[in-house]
Image: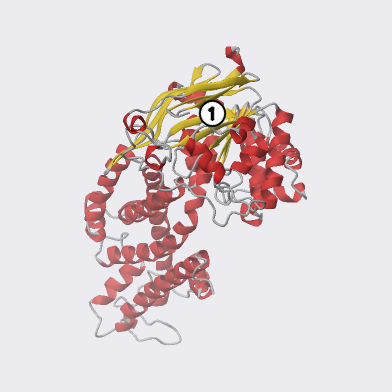
Amino acid sequence: MILVGAIIILIMIGFAVTAPLLTKYGYEEINLKYRNKPPTIEHVMGTDSFGRDVWSRCVYGARVSFIVSLNAVAIGIVLGLFLGMICGFFKGRVDFWIGRVMDVVMSFPALLFSLIIGFSLGASIPNMCLSVGIPLTPIFYRMTRGEALRVSERTYVMAAKSIGSGSIRTMFCHVLPNTIPSLLAVLSTCMGAAITAESALGYLGLGIPKPTPSWGSVINEGRQFIFDAPWVTGFGGLMVALTILGFNLIGDGLRDLMDPKLRV
Amino acid sequence: MAEDARILEINGLTVRFPTSEGVVRAVDGVSLSLDRGETLGVVGESGCGKSVMLNSIMRLLEAPPARIGGEILYNGQDILKMPKRELFRIRGKEITMIFQEPMTSLNPVIKIGPQIAETMLLHELITKDEASAKALELLRQVEIPNAEECLGKYPHQLSGGMRQRVMIAMALACKPQILLADEPTTALDVTIQAQILALLRKLKDEYHMSMMIVTHDLGVIAEVSERVVVFYGGNVVEEAPTRALFDTPLHPYTEGLLGCIPHLSTKTGRLRVIEGNVPNPIDLPEGCVFAPRCPRRERLCVEERPALKEVGDAQGGKRHRVACHMA
């Protein structure tokens, strides 16, 4: 399972990295003679309403989608891990206040949150990373906090303190490494969520400026002609679906691998 | 006895945990002392506060919620009032601790070598290489076979006895003055227990340490300690040189404890037990903590808590003290 997931993701990353080699047409090459044409040998995924090659747009779109989702997850994980660690380890008042802030972030629907950031800061890649990443923070925060609470009750943490290790050191050297396994499983699922969020933003027109394609914008542009040229939306959606499937397979596989009780 | 012979002195230590049902009085006014080079055994049933006392010596209890009173003097300095920096310097360098569960007291994601080296890197100005060379030497001292190989292993690859040896090596890394051992052999099987105890005794002499061993096993006490403190319900009920305690126990609880040890030679049909249970630490009896279970109970026992008083002659400067109206 984990292998299938990994292969899918590797192929997608391969698309993103080697896009120029895989495509015959530029992603913004307009050919008005070939508007909304179904898949042929020449255009394996057909063409969109501007006569642009959908395959090219999907392959180049992988770049934006991956850059945004990787950065977004990185933002989410760094913030979430840091805050969760502090809360789970020090508990008390810090925990209470950071927890309430996280509740506020969590109480906004992720998409609404992204929309607010998108509208107020404008559409650009860094802003998209932020707007997708911040709603992910509470997920990592809660996971890390729970794990940190659990791990800091362990005798080895007490033992670390008993040999004179200070709080910060104990937190980073003894508690943190023991929370990583459970985080890994969440991580890959969140990658999937980030891809979805990115596509949703692209679909709503808050993605990166046109004509640079992302999967979301490919789907969005196909929407108007969904009955005349369903392949545009279809293949764009397929890319998103496959990637999410890949990440979820990795996530499930990792979880099973980490949990000895599920191992047969 | 000269004052400086005492390396650790606990005066009127109380540890309380507020809970929703009431205040748990885990340690309820304990005073005891540890001399240089001495091995003190602390015995008592589960839940009598002995581990809590040990943890408060290291200041490992989280306070709050725990409320700690009294004083714990290490070389005349109160550990409970010590600034954090001083505390971190003492922990692991001058006072160290071995925990009950060797299975969970080593960090599962750090290899043995670096884990032992950590103590030295924290307290001494040495390089990583020197620290790991020392770690190897320590592993040899605690008699671990294939010490080199062991350095690169993870804790889950070792057996319980091996892990306890690693714990001991960690505790000894900076040549501490005091070694606190919280039921160091409880989780191990009997043959390993004997080995670990022999090892502790040997190392204690080599390092000129003072040692405090907390256990519920009188066999362990007889094996290693010179003096014994008997805990009951968060109180010290008897304190005596080991020999004297085994020969002439004065407190009815101590007598009961000794009576509970099964002997191969005696042919009494049933094992003797102490009737009843450990008192609920939320509401300890007002009088003697042992009164509800005591066969020699009288009215005075229920009304007034007996203080520790000295009885008999001091043997070699070691007092025999007991907290019982009847003794």
- Circle 1 residues within 10 Å: few <14, some 14–19, many ≥20: many
Determine the image quadrant of residue A61. bottom left
Residue A212 visible? no
x then y, percent, for residue A82: 40, 45
Q: Is residue B93 left or right of residue A229?
A: right
In this rendering, is residue A182 above or below B7?
below
In this rendering, is residue B198 above or below A106?
above
Determine the image quadrant of residue A192. bottom left
x then y, percent, for residue B166: 66, 44
Determine the image quadrant of residue B282. top left
x then y, percent, for residue B93: 60, 28
Name the residue carrying label 1.
Answer: B239
Q: Nearer the viewer, residue B79 or B308?
A: B308
In terms of secondary structure, where does tag 1 sit? strand
Chain for numbered disc 1: B
Numbered circles on residues, count: 1
Q: Nearer the viewer, residue B310 or B226?
A: B310
Task: Tell which residue pokes out farthest to the top in this image.
Answer: B2
x then y, percent, for residue A144: 40, 51
Residue B24 visible? yes
Q: Is residue B213 left or right of residue B298?
A: right
Amino acid under label 1? Glu
Q: Nearer the viewer, residue B61 or B85?
A: B61
Q: How is the image coloured?
A: secondary structure
Q: Is residue B38 left or right of residue B325?
A: right
Quadrant into which the N terminus of chain B falls:
top right
In this rendering, is residue B273 above or below B214?
below
